[in-house]
Amino acid sequence: MYQMTTEDLELQQSARAFVDDLIPYEAEAELNEGELPPEVAQTMKARAKTSGLLATNMPKSLGGGGYSMFQQVLVQEQVGRATNGLAWMVSTPPQWWPEVATEFQTQRWIVPTIDGEAAECYAITEEYAGSDVDAITSTARRDRSDYVLDGVKWHVTSYNEATYAFFQGRLTNGPHAGEHAMFVVDLPTQGVRVVRTPAYSHTIAHHHPIVAFEGVRVPVSHLIGDEGGGMGFAYEWFRFERFMVAARCLGAAERLIDEATRFAAERVVYGQPIIDYQLVQAMLADSVTELFAARSIVYEAARGVDEGRDLKVQHAQASMVKLYSSEMANRVADRAVQIFGGRGYMRENVAERFFRELRVERIWEGTSEIQRVIIAAQLAKRGVTGLI
């Protein structure tokens, strides 16, 4: 099915077995601020590395998996089957970085990240700049052999787990004044502070604090690529992450359908299992049909990336798969809660957790509304046959 090779299937099964061993810890993590028992976390992180599940998107020459986009989707689909972000340890470092990194940056940050010894976070979003990255007001000023960074960033996902941050700011001087640049900032660094750490709907160990950068000095060696290149890196990151979001939504939907079907077969109401009632059957049938459709377009679009499809088409299709898969998974979660009834409203229930966790998939890495704008713009330029 889906024309998978032996290598594809083996990778998929390895990732599935890894996640299956995390799933029994979900309820415990839910009641413990998303944290796994330390010994379990340590064992599973080591296993992720030895199983080749870390850095699947990074070049083999640097120690990464060197897998195709399709294979990365297969791994992240399995990651999505676990709640509470427990499988986030199967990390995908910044795929766009190696091509523009200096040797210093490669050895200082990229290789340790691939090895699982370092981790990144993105300080890009601001209070009034989310999907519209060009609206950021954070600044970067050249001062002799340093840059001085200032700004307040929101939703800095995984900041508490990170050893360095990507900071995007608008240049205030020099030939590229007004354009964007991206920098690496080691954590902790003087001038970087957490303003506050808001509580979110989901319960995961990775926090999303508001972080202030106040007169933070970094040497020129911490500039990524060229001045003015920051937006290009952000767009590449968004394109890749939209595929990963879509893939994780597939896994979440599959898990929900499995769990809801099993429950419906066992739950007896008025003398018969509720799976025999047509209204429950309809919810399950709609869910698995939508999953089939979503998986088909995600797999097809991922293979298009591997085949070198036009970059603008890739960008539009990344938006399509993110839009459809995230909204599909939310519909499936809503139906699953309904099938579970009162149990579906309990935090110990998988449907309740996914109901909260999946809502953000329609927001981060570009809202559903932004995805529709991107898709429509490319449709206007290329027509239907140019996009699908």
Image: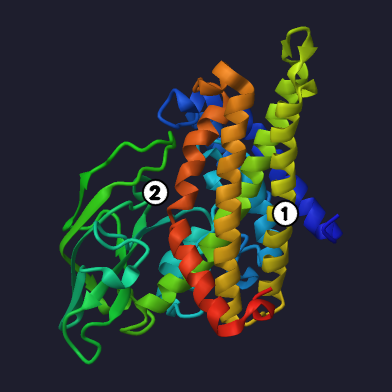
376 left or right of 227? right
Note whether 249 is above or below 370 in the view shown: above
**What residue is shown with label 1?**
293
Q: Disc 2 vs disc 1: which is toward the camera?
A: 1
Placement of the N terminus among the 4 image quadrants? bottom right
Looking at the rendered structure, the secondary structure element under dot 2 is loop
- The structure's colour scheme is rainbow
Name the kind of residue labelled 1 in the image.
Ala
List x then y, in percent, for residue 350. Answer: 58, 28
- Residue 35 horizontal side relative to residue 263, left or right: left
Q: Is residue 61 above or below residue 89?
A: below
Q: Earlier in the sequence, mark 2 or mark 1?
A: 2
Closest to the observer, 46 or 185: 185
Q: Position of residue 195 (x, y in %)?
A: 19, 47
Along the line of sight, the residue nearer the viewer: 171 or 294? 294
Q: Quick one: quadrant of the C terminus?
A: bottom right
Where is mark 2, residue-wise? 158
Q: How many marks?
A: 2
Q: Is residue 360 above or below residue 356?
A: below
- On the question of residue 328 being in view, the answer is yes
**Looking at the rendering, which quadrant does residue 316 occupy?**
bottom right
Q: Give neighbour class at mark 2: few <14, some 14-19, many 20+ (Cα, 10 Å).
A: some
Residue 7: name its quadrant: bottom right
The kind of secondary structure element at disc 1 is helix
Res. 55 visible in picture:
no
Q: Position of residue 231 (x, y in %)?
A: 37, 76
Residue ranking furthest to the top = 271
Are discs 2 and 1 less than 8 Å apart at CB? no
